[in-house]
C-alpha cells in the first residue's frame, strides 16, 4: 500500500479534487473558456460594444469643450477686423479725427469733427460697412465761433495807409499759396497755378474798388540782353488774361515786366533762381500808375553814352 502512495511534497500532478473548488492547472477543453471568465479581444481590450460607445462619447465631449473655447477668440478677432475696416473707411473719407470702437457688432464713433454735416457723414460711412448692426454716434461738434465771440457791427476806423497795407497783405497772401509758375522759357502757366488764379479772381471780384499792377520777374539767365525783360512782360500779360477770363474788369489790371532787375534772392543757386522767377501783385491807390519799367538793356543809357564820347 505504501508503494502506491504519492509524495505530497511533489507538485507534479497535484490535484485536490473538486471538493476544494480548485481544479488542476488549466486544461480546459479546446474552444471553451473558464467558468466565470470573459472573452477578450486580441489586443487585450474588452470587446463589449458599450465600452467602445462610452469611449466615443468621452472623445466627443472633450472636442466640444475645445471647440467652444475657441469661439470667443474668433469672435473677438472678427470684431477687431471690423474695427480696422471702419477706421480705414473714415480715413479714406477724410475723417481722420473719428475714433472707432466695436462692441457686440455695434460701431461706436468718438472724437471731434468740425460740423454737424461731418458728424452725419461719419455715421453714413460706418453704416456702409458690412457686418455693422448699429452705430452709436458720439462725435463732438464744437459750437460755431460766432456763438462764442460777440461780433462787432462797427467797422474799425483805420487810417487810409493802414487799410491799404491790410489789403496789400491779403492780396499777397492769396497769390502766394502756391505761387504762379510757368513752363520753362515761355508764358504758359502750369496747371498747379490754376487754383491760385481762381482765388485771385474771387478776391478781386469781392473787392471791386481796388486796382492791381501785375509785375513779372525772372532770374538772371538770358541768351541776349533784353530777353528777360520781354519774357517777364509776356508772363504778366498771361496772368492778366487769366484774370480777365474770370470776370475782372480790364481797367483794374495793369502789367509790368521787370526782367531780373529786382531779385529777392541770389542767382547762383537753383533755389535762389526759382525764388526770383515770380509774379507780384501791387495794390494801386486812386491816381497811382504803379512802378515804372526798368531801363531796356538793349538801349544805351544816354548818360553812359555821353561819358563814352
Image (cartoon, rainbow, N blue to C red):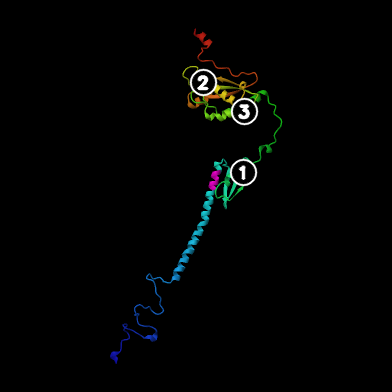
Q: Secondary structure at mark 1?
A: helix
**Magenta region:** 83-89
Q: Is residue 171 above or below residue 8?
A: above
Q: Is residue 288 magenta?
A: no
Q: Which mark is residue 231?
A: 2
- Residue 163 visible in the picture: yes
Q: Which residue is mark 3?
A: 203
Crowd rating for badge 3 (residues with CA inside 10 Å; few <14, some 14–19, many 20+): some
Q: Crowding near pointer 1: few (<14 within 10 Å), some, many (20+)?
A: few
Q: At which x and y percent is residue 192?
A: 53, 30
Q: Which mark is residue 101?
A: none
Q: Is residue 155 left or right of residue 72?
A: right
Extreme-left residue of the structure: 3
Q: Considering only order in the chain, which callout, 3 or 2, is on the residue closer to the N terminus?
A: 3
Residue under the point 44% across and 70% down: 49
Query: Which residue was labeled with disc 1?
Result: 120
Residue 276 at what x, y percent from top left? 52, 24
Residues 50 and 256: in front is 50
Distance between the Cα atoms at labels 2 and 1? 52 Å
Residue found at the very far bottom of the displayed protein: 1
Q: What is the number of callouts on the image?
A: 3
Amino acid at each position: 500500500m505504501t508503494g502506491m502512495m504519492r509524495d505530497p511534497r511533489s507538485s507534479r500532478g497535484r490535484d485536490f479534487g473538486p471538493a476544494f473548488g480548485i481544479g488542476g492547472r488549466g486544461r480546459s477543453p479546446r474552444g471553451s473558456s473558464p467558468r466565470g471568465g470573459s472573452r477578450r479581444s486580441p489586443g487585450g481590450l474588452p470587446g463589449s460594444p458599450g465600452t467602445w460607445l462610452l469611449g466615443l462619447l468621452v472623445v466627443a465631449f472633450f472636442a466640444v469643450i475645445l471647440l467652444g473655447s475657441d469661439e470667443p477668440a474668433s469672435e473677438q478677432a472678427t470684431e477687431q477686423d471690423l474695427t480696422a475696416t471702419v477706421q480705414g473707411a473714415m480715413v479714406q473719407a477724410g475723417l481722420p479725427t473719428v475714433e472707432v470702437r466695436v462692441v457686440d457688432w455695434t460701431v461706436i464713433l468718438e472724437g471731434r469733427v468740425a460740423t454737424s454735416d461731418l458728424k452725419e457723414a461719419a455715421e453714413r460711412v460706418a453704416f456702409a460697412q458690412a457686418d455693422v448692426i448699429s452705430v452709436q454716434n458720439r462725435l463732438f461738434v464744437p459750437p460755431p465761433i460766432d456763438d462764442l465771440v460777440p461780433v462787432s457791427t462797427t467797422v474799425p476806423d483805420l487810417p487810409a495807409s493802414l487799410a491799404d497795407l491790410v489789403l496789400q497783405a491779403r492780396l499777397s497772401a492769396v497769390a502766394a499759396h502756391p505761387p504762379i509758375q510757368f513752363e520753362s522759357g515761355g508764358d504758359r502757366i502750369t496747371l498747379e497755378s490754376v487754383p491760385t488764379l481762381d482765388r485771385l479772381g474771387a478776391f478781386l471780384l469781392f473787392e471791386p474798388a481796388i486796382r492791381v499792377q501785375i509785375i513779372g520777374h525772372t532770374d538772371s539767365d538770358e541768351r541776349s540782353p533784353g530777353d528777360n525783360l520781354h519774357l517777364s512782360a509776356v508772363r504778366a500779360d498771361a496772368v492778366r488774361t487769366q484774370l480777365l477770363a474770370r470776370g475782372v474788369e480790364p481797367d483794374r489790371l495793369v502789367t509790368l515786366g521787370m526782367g531780373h532787375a529786382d531779385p529777392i534772392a541770389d542767382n547762383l543757386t537753383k533755389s535762389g533762381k526759382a525764388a526770383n522767377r515770380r509774379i507780384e501783385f501791387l495794390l494801386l491807390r486812386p491816381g497811382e500808375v504803379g512802378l515804372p519799367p526798368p531801363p531796356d538793356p538793349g538801349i544805351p543809357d544816354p548818360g553812359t553814352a555821353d561819358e563814352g564820347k
